[in-house]
Image (cartoon, helix red, strand yellow):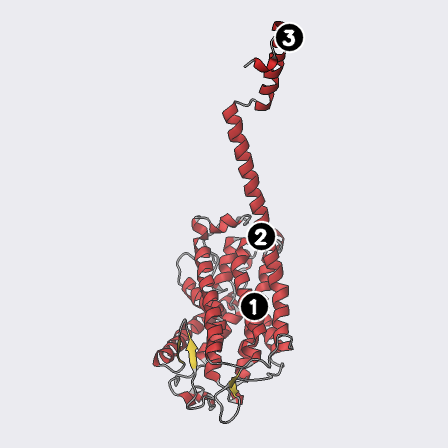
Amino acid sequence: MSRYIFTLIAISLTFFPIPVASYTHYRDAESCDLVGDGDIYGKGIRYSLYIQCFTLILAPLGASTQDVHALRIGLNAVATAVIFNFLKDIPRKGFLFLEFWIIVAMLQFILWVCNWISFMFVLKPVMRDTRLEVLDPTSLLLSVFFFIVPRKGADKEEFWGTLSQSVGYRQGCEAKMNFYGNSDLYHKNWVAFLKAMCILSIPLIVSAIMNFLWIYFMHLLGFFDEFEQNPEDEPKSAPCTPCAVQKFLVGCICSKLDTPNWPYTTPPRIISGHKVSRMAKWCAAFGFVACVSSVIWTENTIDANNIDLSAATITSSGQLIPLIVTAFTSVPTLWSVFRRFVRWCIHILNGFRRSKNTLTDESTGGIDLGLVEPVNESAGSIIAETSMVDAGDIV
């Protein structure tokens, strides 16, 4: 239980002392050209989040539980660093409103899949197992991220009114948001959407904290001891089960689904029509849409505002560290998926060949047709010798 809490603390302490090299601001006093914050949405950070989210969707096709756990830690680490760097930009009076929406665009997978689906799963009556999981630290942190947004979102100069900070917006300059099409960043619909998300984050945080406190105190009283599983029963290198995939995709608030604990061996098991994998398929499809939307929304918003990120080169430490984390977490998972997919293809080809040979044997009655021709040739030679007729004339 406390392992996840210490993980969040360790991630926070690791990234918090790192100084923020830049923040989103206008280039000079008279220009509307924006200089971006490479520590929040630089190329290395964006590509790292994209790759890890897409790898997470492919993980059910063959990754082990150990690979998935490493991938989860890496994704949480990068997302936590982005949020802490954003919070450190507050006293610098950067263009916080634009930074906020870019972060929302980049982290759509965690926001939509982990947060909101996990909240719906808490209310789902099919959760029959009493063994519950603890909260996902990044999901809870992102909920708080929405919760701290003030209610005065319509006022450009008081977006962070409760913190007595300016939004950093310059009158007369264009600020755009791209959600499959450019629109004004301060359009009333976007402001209403922001307020709605702030309101939705309140019950999510309250329910998450109440669940966390209940699970924590029940764990201290030893209530879950009888449900603890022997670590030797399921080694870390064992293949993922659909149950583990579902819990991973929807966050850690939900309990086990009504799913048998059979090992996942081939890709068709998760994409088949089996009823126990329907929820995992739905979550994976939802996550894929969130990933594609994240890429389109983020990249087009940066292009629409002509944000200059030339100072944050791909070889800088702020961009290189997330890519290294991604390499150590995503590459093993993708390699496992590729190997299992190749084995599955070989298995399908072997099955097709065996089926073809079986059909051939059934059509010939088990007789090898290759033996028929030599018998006819030898019989023709014998007849030709006795009757003095050319063997080629015998039909």
Amino acid at the residue labelled 2: Pro
Comparing labels 3 and 1, the label whose residue is closer to the camera? 3
Q: Secondary structure at mark 3?
A: helix
Residue topped by disc 2:
239
x and y, in percent, of residue 195 in the image: 38, 79
- Up the image or down, 337 lies above or below 291; here it is above
Residue topped by disc 3:
385
Residue topped by disc 1:
75
Between the C-alphas of marks 2 and 3, the distance is 70 Å
Amino acid at the residue labelled 3: Glu
Relative depth, front residue between 100 and 125: 100
Tags 3 and 1 in contact by the CB under 8 Å rule? no
Comparing labels 2 and 3, the label whose residue is closer to the camera? 3
The structure residue drawn at horizontal position 65% and vertical position 77%, both measured from the top left corner, is 317
The quarter of the image holding the N terminus is bottom right
Amino acid at the residue labelled 1: Leu
Between the C-alphas of marks 3 and 1, the distance is 85 Å
